Image (tube, coloured by chain):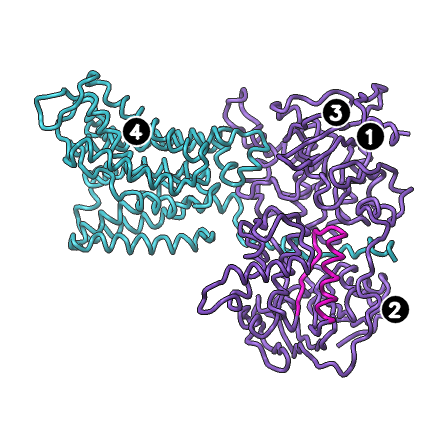
Amino acid sequence: MNISRERDGAVGDGRPEADGTSPVAQAVGVSKHFGATVALREVGLTVAPGESHALVGRNGAGKSTLVSILTGLTRPDTGQVYFNGEPAPPITDRNAWRARVACVYQKSTIIPTISVAENLYLNRQDTVGGRGGAISWRTMRASAADLLQTWNIDVDPRIEAGRLTVEQRQTLEIARALSFGARFIILDEPTAQLDGAGIQRLFDRLRSLRAAGVAFLFISHHLQEIYEICQTVTVYRDARHVLTTPVASLSKERLIEAMTGEALGLREAGEQAAPVSAAAPEVLRVDRLVGTSEFGEVSFGVRAGETLGIAGAVGAGAVALGETIVGLRKPLSGTVSVAGKPVRPGSVPAGLAAGIGFVPEDRHRQGLIPLRSIEENLTLTVTDRLGRFGFVSGDARRRTATALMQRLDVKAAGPEQAVSALSGGNQQKVVMGRALASAPKVLVLIRPTAGVDVKSKESLLGTVEVATAAGSAALIVSDELDDLRAADRVIVMFKGRVVAELPRGWSDQQMVAAIEGLQGEGADSGE
Amino acid sequence: MVSEMADRVVERETPAAVEVPTRRTGPKLARFRDFALIPVIGLLLVAGFVASPFFLTLDNMVAVLQQSTELSLVVLAEALILLVARMDLSLESTVGLAPVIAVWLVLPAHGSRFNGLGLLPGWTAVPLCLAIGALIGALNGLLVLKVRLNAFIVTLGMLITLRGLQIAITGGQSVFELPSSIKYLGRAAWLGVPVSVWICVVLFAVGIVALSWFRHGRSLYAIGGNADAARAAGIRVERVVWVVFIVGSILAALAGILFVGRLGSIAAGQGAGMIFRVFAAAVIGGISLNGGRGTLFGALTGVLVLVLIDNVMVYGGVPPVWEGFLDGVIILGALVVSRFTSGEAQD
């Protein structure tokens, strides 16, 4: 049906049919080159009115380029874009584009320093008289209040937008898009920064908007979300269109296969791992550690070769606990010891010296120095080993970095390439490599696979396995089941307390129940 | 197994989602912030009154206002530029150079200590001066926006270049022979109030109205807050920033004209070293160095605070040799205080 036609259209130069139900958006035979790199090769996409259409692909598949072409920010080399069956307006006519399509980017386009109302009506404020007239703040606030009410957004239009939560900013962006008259909205990783309840509220909102005839192009790394919210899915791989099909008729195995081009799905990390020997020495000991406000008394030990998961929802204190262990935060009381020796609390250098390597939560903020080279980023924590008296040997650095890049399978032009030029998955590998560079006794990973595609996720978790096999202890702080599954046992935190400890072999329901603070069956309460 | 892979707990922990607004300042409080310095100004008036009976007199107050006009105009310029998250250090050199070039083009080629080119009639001195300001601003804008150089280093280089050019033209001397047209604005008075004060009041009023009620003015806040978002909203970011650079330099040139009139000559170092006070006044007045936050009214109160501090020191009998030191200390202190009253880290 629609799919095959679109598939053909993607190759040929078929124009959309003007049969009254023309697609809200359609890209036909679109190609785009950036220098020598081919970003898109003769791809197509068709979004029907009122449809939620998923666009998936690994990092570098060409999704962002297509978004940029569909929103009129980039001109395709070849091919055409149609909206409601009509050719797209000229690139310079921003307002015409905005009346047809809107994009909610990962990076917020809300301006934090001005009011909510003004954000909604930026550069088209209500004025007295013509376009050049004075702004009528009263009218503008009233229109903003109306708009917010129409879409059920409970926000005071007068407050500064910087005070809104991520979720509120996102709904604000959607409302703004709708107010331009656009009935086609692109959501680029909209759930990446939301917590579970926020994601559900977003999905509820999307469902009700879809019922009102709004179509969505939904881009996400989380395949489950696609099954939850989308009807149709299009897969791109290596700048090419791979398939378009109704979501319901596509199994997850086949979807992953289409994305990776490999017939095997994600290997269950650590599934076959042998149980940790009870004789293995305890490498990390956390003793009656108390956070300033985030978590109460926590004690546990991790043996050499063991991986411990720490699970918890937003505000459960799991991330804070992880950050306290590595020294990013200072605890109120309690000790962290590595191989029997206490580590000075609240000091990252002390942690590193004691042998704690870590992958911080936010790779952009704490993990990477984006403009510096891969090798420099990789060796940041081990400069003392690369030469004497503070002198860093270039050769030694290059050798260390190259070895790490190989070990982690970082895809890059070379160790001298700037980290900012890498895809998200590869950036995270560099952060991981930095943690491993010091050959740590204890490896702490805080939400290591956030915003990373399936293939990179697999290789990152595989690296942890290799490190523990070599005798390190690993700590994975996460709430992604995939990450936690790699752990030998998982302690679950809820509202700052450890509420459960689950050995390997837990079911998803058990884990979710424990994280949500519902003591599900079989979840034996921990300490 | 594979199907489970895609299952995941929807709960995820992000710093962004649990972000607690740290600044609890609504629009009302923001307006209060505008008036935050009013009590300080009141306090300074009281201090001056205690220090000397001659301080709180009409004559002195008018003199204080007149002396602060040049600084105010440059602060107005810098505030606009800071709002779009740029900076211009060269304004202080424009204050000196623009009148010098204008006068040089106008003065006769011989017959006095400072020989000009005599190319244009005397009345053109003022428009020429402003045009030269516009030219300097356009050049700064070109280097920052088209060549994409950092505004700090460009305008620092421009500061030195312009100052050097002024010394080259004047031979490092002050210029005393001046066409009367350029002296008028700085020394005349309308209705008993110096023209320079009128100019200042009008320009600040125009600026406040434009930045509060007009789209082009509001776009400055949008650009300074998030330039990409402003661009996405259809604001011509580069053009607006360029215009802001040009307007800023014109205002600096106008400040130069007011100096010339008030002092009756173009000092060799006219405007030199004032940029620190300009930035200090803007920041104390609540203009964010990160762009997008602050008001012109706030900046104006910042100027008044600095000028009153100076004046109070004079009447308080502070030895002149200590004035520079105390001035610096007080400004640094005021910056620390304003850091906490505005609640914004300046990193």
The residue positioned 77% from the left and 49% from the top of the image is A222
Cα distance between the residues tagged 4 and 2: 78 Å
Task: Name the mark on residue B199.
Answer: 4
Tell me: B84 left or right of B280. right
Residue range (magenta) = A443-469
Provide residue A92's location: percent of width, then percent of height. 60, 23
The residue depicted at 62 percent of the width and 66 percent of the height is A323
Whether pointer 4 and pointer 2 mark residues with C-beta atoms closer than 8 Å, the reply is no
The residue that disc 2 covers is A521
- Write down the chain letter for disc 4: B
| Residue identified by numbered label 1 | A48
Tell me if mark 1 has few (under 14), some (14-19) or many (20+) residues whose alpha carbon lies within 10 angstroms of its own.
many
* Amino acid at pointer 3: Phe
Q: Which quarter of the image is occupied by the N terminus of chain A?
A: top right
Q: CA distance from mark 3 to mark 4?
A: 53 Å
- In screen coordinates, is A357 left or right of B41? right
The label number, if any, that marks residue A83 in the structure image: 3
Q: Nearer the viewer, mark 2 or mark 3?
A: 3
Q: Colour of chain B?
A: cyan
Which is nearer the eye, A448 or B55?
A448
